[in-house]
Amino acid sequence: MFDVYVLFLILSGIAMLVMAFVRTDYAKRRQVLNFILGAGFTVYGLYLLLAFNGGHYVLFLYVFVLPVLMIVQFFRDRARAKSRAMATRARLQSG
């Protein structure tokens, strides 16, 4: 169980860091949140993997839910921005 948890921590952190570094002109606050949470998840996972010698560790259930929610929101924001851009272009061409 511990190894699976560490793997999910690191993979979720990396996924959120990737979303944070994708250049967008929208959702800047969400990019910052992705960066902070992604860095935290990755660092904690690497700590557990490389330096943890046993004992007590904190099991965050957010590791399993939060990345999925952040990924869904990332693609919703992306689709919303594309539709706004297309609507703006259509308005400019017709007017």
Image (cartoon, helix red, strand yellow):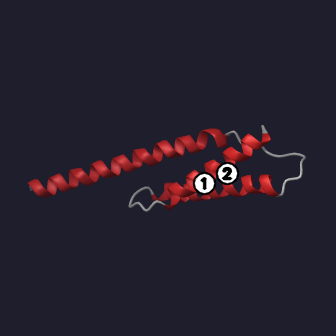
* Mark 1 residue crowding within 10 angstroms, few (<14) / some (14–19) / many (20+): many
Q: Residue at x 78, y 56 (%)?
A: 47
Residue 33 seen by the camera = no
Q: Position of residue 17 (x, y in %)?
A: 57, 57
- Which amino acid type corresponds to the residue marked 1 in the rendered image? Ile
- Which amino acid type corresponds to the residue marked 2 in the rendered image? Ile
Task: Tell me the SS state at disc 1.
Answer: helix
Task: Tell me the SS state at disc 2.
Answer: helix
Residue 32 seen by the camera = yes
Q: Position of residue 75 (x, y in %)?
A: 43, 46
Residue at the disc numbered 2: 10
Q: Residue furthest left?
A: 95
In front here: 45 or 33? 45
Q: Is mark 2 in CB contact (under 8 Å) with mark 1?
A: yes
Q: Is residue 64 left or right of residue 74?
A: right
Q: Is residue 27 left or right of residue 36?
A: left
Cα distance in 3D space between marks 2 and 1 = 6 Å
Q: Is residue 65 above or below residue 45?
A: above
Q: Is residue 64 above or below residue 22?
A: above
Residue 70's disc is none
Residue at the disc numbered 1: 14
Q: Is residue 93 left or right of residue 46?
A: left
Q: Residue at x 79, y 41 (%)?
A: 2
In front here: 4 or 38? 4
* Mark 2 residue crowding within 10 angstroms, few (<14) / some (14–19) / many (20+): many
